[in-house]
Each structure stands twice: as structure tokens, then as C-alpha cells.
């Protein structure tokens, strides 16, 4: 058995997060991979907060037309 990790490219299609549970807060985010394969990502509150933080840090790197426009 190999310990190598396989890489899968997937794209966010702009769909919202489906709320599966509100207590505890659990949601499902769908990404589209090659050949119309759907990748489901389950997230909880802590994961969602970490993702928001990572996305804000990513957006802060934008320049020119991609410069951040959030407060």
C-alpha cells in the first residue's frame, strides 16, 4: 500500500452550502471535478471559519482589478 496522496482538481460552481444540521452546525459544499464528477466536502463551524480566514488571506494578495474591495 502506498502512502502517496493523489491530487484531484475540482472547481467551485457557485452553489451555496447545503445545511445538513444546525446543532451542531454541519454543511455540505459541492465541487465539480473532471468528467462531471461531484466532490462533496462536509464542513462544520470551525472548518468554515478557517476556510473564511484562508480565503480572506488569499484575496488580500490581489492587485489591480483583483485588488481587495472588502473592509
Image: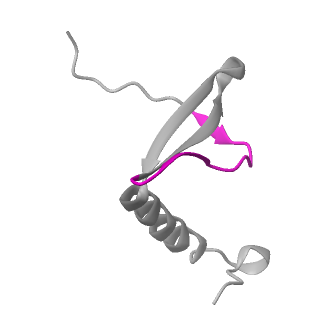
- Measuring 74% from the left and 49% from the top, which residue is drawn there? 14
x then y, percent, for residue 62: 64, 74
From the viewer's side, name the closer residue of 50 and 42: 42
What colour scheme does the image use? one colour
- Measuring 66% from the left and 23% from the top, which residue is drawn there? 34
x then y, percent, for residue 15: 73, 46
Magenta region, residue range: 9-24
x then y, percent, for residue 56: 54, 73
Farthest residue toward the front? 23
For residue 37, above or below residue 14: above
Farthest residue toward the bottom? 71
Quarter of the image with the N terminus is top left
Q: Quadrant of residue 50?
A: bottom left
Q: Is 6 colored magenta in this rendering?
A: no
From the viewer's side, name the closer residue of 71 and 23: 23
Q: Is 22 colored magenta in this rendering?
A: yes
- Measuring 54% from the left and 33% from the top, which residue is drawn there? 40
Amino acid at each position: 500500500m502506498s502512502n502517496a496522496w493523489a491530487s484531484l482538481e475540482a472547481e467551485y460552481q457557485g452553489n451555496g452550502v447545503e445545511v445538513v444540521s444546525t446543532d451542531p452546525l454541519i454543511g455540505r459544499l459541492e465541487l465539480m471535478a473532471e468528467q462531471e464528477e461531484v466532490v462533496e466536502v462536509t464542513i462544520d463551524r470551525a472548518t468554515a471559519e478557517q476556510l473564511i480566514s484562508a480565503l480572506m488571506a488569499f484575496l488580500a494578495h490581489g492587485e489591480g482589478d483583483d485588488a481587495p474591495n472588502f473592509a
